[in-house]
Image (cartoon, rainbow, N blue to C red):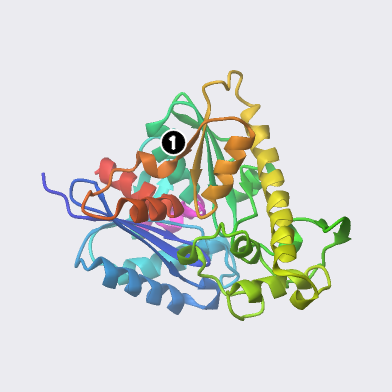
Amino acid sequence: MNKSPTIGWDIGGAHLKAALLDAEGNLLQVLQVPCALWRGLNELEAAIDEVLSQFSISTATHAITMTGELVDLFANRQTGVCEISRIMHANLVGTKQFYTGSHDLDFAGFVAIDEVNAHWQHIASANWLASAAFVAKQVEHALLIDIGSTTSDFVLITQHTPVCLGLTDAARMQTEELVYTGVIRTPLMALTQKIQFENMVTSVAAEYFATTADAYRLTDDLVVEDDMTDTADGKEKTIQASAQRLARMIGHDADDKSLDTWIALAQSFKQQQVSRLQEVAAQHILRVKNNSKLSIIGAGAGSFLVREIAENMKLPYIDVADFIAHSQSFCDSELKHWATVCLPAYAVAYLAFHNN
């Protein structure tokens, strides 16, 4: 039986991510485009048009997951789920399936548009569950860590099964399976109240002067293509502008010190974030009685932090893209990077492909 292409969609509050599979289930393209959803649903429509123009296909099976229902455009999450689903349904041609997950975390459940309102609680912020279901098919024992622009997901996998303490955002925040820290949009003031600067410890301004993207531009960890979000002051993303924003966090101007000094400060902020995330990783690893077989799986724009955490903990590291089937006609390194960054989009497409 011939299948149509499959597109997996992951609608976030700041980005729209999409993965295109061919009729055999191989990954052809992955895209991430800016989508400032809090500004209005027209932002989502424009982002959809951008993706479809680059994928250049007329019809497909569309598998859809989201976290964008959380933005303050919507009065509540139910409204957000229903409005996002309505826009996706109206702007896509072909079969449209909305991801709900499933109680056994096996191949996922999907519903049609007329069932979205009845299942909105299972659709809301379920993209991590798609990633977990996909990875669990590939590896027996692992801790999946997906560090994105804004949040970090931790999913423990044992015997090819995700072992989750919580399923909703609220429950996962309590169990630290969802941690609100990322490598692009997180305000630096959210990482720590005090920071090492030269030979002293200084307080950090409780002001939205700079974000983690500023720090990771200076440490040269952030891939330029991932850096899609506006800066805190709306100005350039250059090294000098990033240093100026970073300096403001401790009451300085960038001209007060050499660039090497601000790079060192950026490294200090990085270590604050690594320490926080590594503490959470260790907490989840302790849930496994015999963790000697455990690997750490890295995903997201912040997978470079996951690799560092694995090295610190002396555990094997695997990039999630190593599990993804892709077409050899495309640049492996570029496709591998985007598959890592946009894991939920690929995962939900994979689940839909194998569920049909």
Residue 305 location in percent, x, y? 58, 47
Give the magenta range.
114-125
Left or right, 159 with reference to 187? left
**Dominant secondary-structure state across the stretch colored magenta:** helix
Q: Is residue 179 above or below residue 220?
A: above
Residue 36 location in percent, x, y? 51, 73
Query: As rendered, which of 281 and 247 lies closer to the eye?
Result: 247
Residue drawn where x is 65% and y is 75% of the image? 240
Residue 205 location in percent, x, y? 82, 68
Q: Is residue 291 above or below residue 223?
A: above
| Residue, far left | 1
Q: Residues within 10 Å of mark 1 (few under 14, many from 20)?
A: some
Residue 42 location in percent, x, y? 44, 79
Query: As rendered, which of 51 and 321 lies closer to the eye?
Result: 321
Left or right, 233 with reference to 42? right
Query: As rendered, which of 94 and 192 lies closer to the eye?
Result: 192
Can residue 196 be seen at all in this image of the molecule?
yes
Q: Is residue 67 above or below residue 206?
A: above
Left or right, 312 with reference to 253? left
Q: Which residue is mark 1?
A: 105
Q: Which quarter of the rendered picture does the C terminus lie within? A: top left
Residue drawn where x is 38% and y is 55% of the image? 115
Can residue 111 be seen at all in this image of the molecule?
no
Give the SS element for disc 1.
loop
248 is within the stretch colored magenta: no
Residue drawn where x is 43% and y is 65% of the image? 16
117 is within the stretch colored magenta: yes
Tell me which amino acid carries mark 1: Leu
